[in-house]
Amino acid sequence: MKKDFLNLGKQPIANSFLSSISKKSLKSEYFYNLIISFNTKNFLVSVKKPVNPKIQYTNKYAHRASESQTMRKAFRSAAIKLYKRFKPKNIMEIGSNDGVFLKNFARQKVIGVEPCRNLAEITKKKFTTYPNFWNKVLSKKILKKHSEVDLIFSANTISHIPNLKETFEAIFNVMSDKGVLVIEDPSLSSVIKINSYDQFYDEHVYVFSTLAVENIVKKYKLRLFDVQKINTHGGSLRYYICKNNSKYKKTKRLVSILNEEKKTGLDNFNTFKKFAGRVKNSKKKLVSLLKKIKKNNNKIISYGATYKSTTVFNYCKIDTRYFHYVTDTTYNKQGKFTPGTHIPIISPEIGFNDSVDYAFLGAWNFKREILNKEKKFIKRGGKFITHVPEVKILSK
Ligand code: DWN
């Protein structure tokens, strides 16, 4: 049974950065109700009513996975480790974005799948890339053209696909008998522990736990045999999945993480009810801190036009009354406006200057990289604000 525990209100599509805020474009802005539910049977946490993927993953998809040094390094390290451990003859990535993972392999070994055509165009120049949604039709097409796949990798993508049955059945189709599926997604345990409620937005249809993944994959003749904690995106998990009859044994760390999740209460609805209470508090504290700072005539901006910020801004009703603008290094976000709250987005070269007193860390998951890069800002008295794990002004 599905039980709702969190209502994040009316939200726009996180990727719908607006080119203009004319009356006409604001009139056509799409909103939906972001309600999060817990399935008491398989422990899966999901968006109650997912948005149609066709309006999310278009040829105007803004996020570039290679935009941060942290992610470039993380994907390179993942590629090397996975290759060493599984020695695959070929590799397929579902949701290959701008090729940040694929580029670490020889071009004849890899296949990319990416429904956002603007991104698929980038990798197509070097790698075989299918500009399609992942499903059984595509899996059959790939099987016809290539051999079965030994390593299927998918980071921050499986959690985005509403139809898990179709997804895993299609994976089963193309995976070789000794093959491995490796999935990376933000971990529910981290979300609960650090109160990162902004991991919930339209694209994150699911925020997985190990408990839930183990329950789900077994419905599709697949088996979770290992899991690993990784630091990316504020705490993620890397799941290792094989076919039922495969040689891989359940690892000790999988047993230990399953136990840890039970201790955290990820199999218990009450945990999520309590979390929802902490989310409400976080909103109150953030708005009151911003009001206080604004009262003293300080200039506040936001750092990183993240999809996560869409949730925070729309839930807390933070707009140009608080933030002058948002800075972001991504070229195709610059010159646009944030979804729902219509704050201008500009390049950090222009916007992150001496006039800024406070910067909200929209990209809090890159805190270390950003603090390292922005030493001058901090030295001259500039301050960062965060809401994760709690609302505060960061001290030096
Ligand atoms: O799952 C998803 C994750 C992985 O990526 C997607 N559904 C969409 C996207 O979500 P996000 O926007 O919350 O992801 P990031 O990676 O936290 O976005 C960081 C943003 O901040 C990028 O637009 C780049 C920008 N940035 C910046 O302006 N200066 C990042 C760094 C490190 C910087 O120094």
Image (cartoon, rainbow, N blue to C red):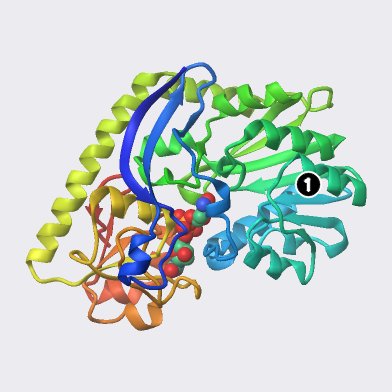
Residue 196 appears in the picture as rendered: no
Q: Horizontal and vertical percent for residue 220? A: 73, 25
- Does 258 sit above or below residue 34? above
Q: Is residue 73 left or right of residue 385?
A: right
Residue drawn where x is 69% and y is 37% of the image: 167
The residue at the far left in this view is 295
Amino acid type, callout 1: Leu
**333 vs 237: above or below:** below
Q: Determine which quarter of the picture holds residue 263.
A: top left
Q: Ligand 1 within 8 A of label 1's CB?
A: no
Tally the numbered discs. Answer: 1
With 64 as the anchor, is 242 left or right in this view?
Answer: right
Number of residues whose C-alpha sits closer than 10 Å to that of mark 1, classed few (under 14), some (14–19) or many (20 or more): some
Q: Residue at image x 53%, y 34%?
A: 208
- The location of residue 367, given as percent across then percent down, is 40, 59
Q: Secondary structure at mark 1?
A: helix
Q: Is residue 121 positioned above or below 168 on the image? A: below
At a point 56% along the width and 64% down the height, the residue shown is 64
Q: Position of residue 174 (x, y in %)?
A: 83, 40
Judge whether 259 appears above or below 118 on screen.
above
Image quarter where the C terminus lies is: bottom left
User: Residue 276: percent from the left, percent from the top?
Assistant: 30, 32
Q: Is residue 309 visible?
A: yes
Query: Is 36 left, or right, of 147 in this rendering?
Result: left
Q: Which residue is mark 1?
A: 138
Residue at left 19%, top 64%?
322
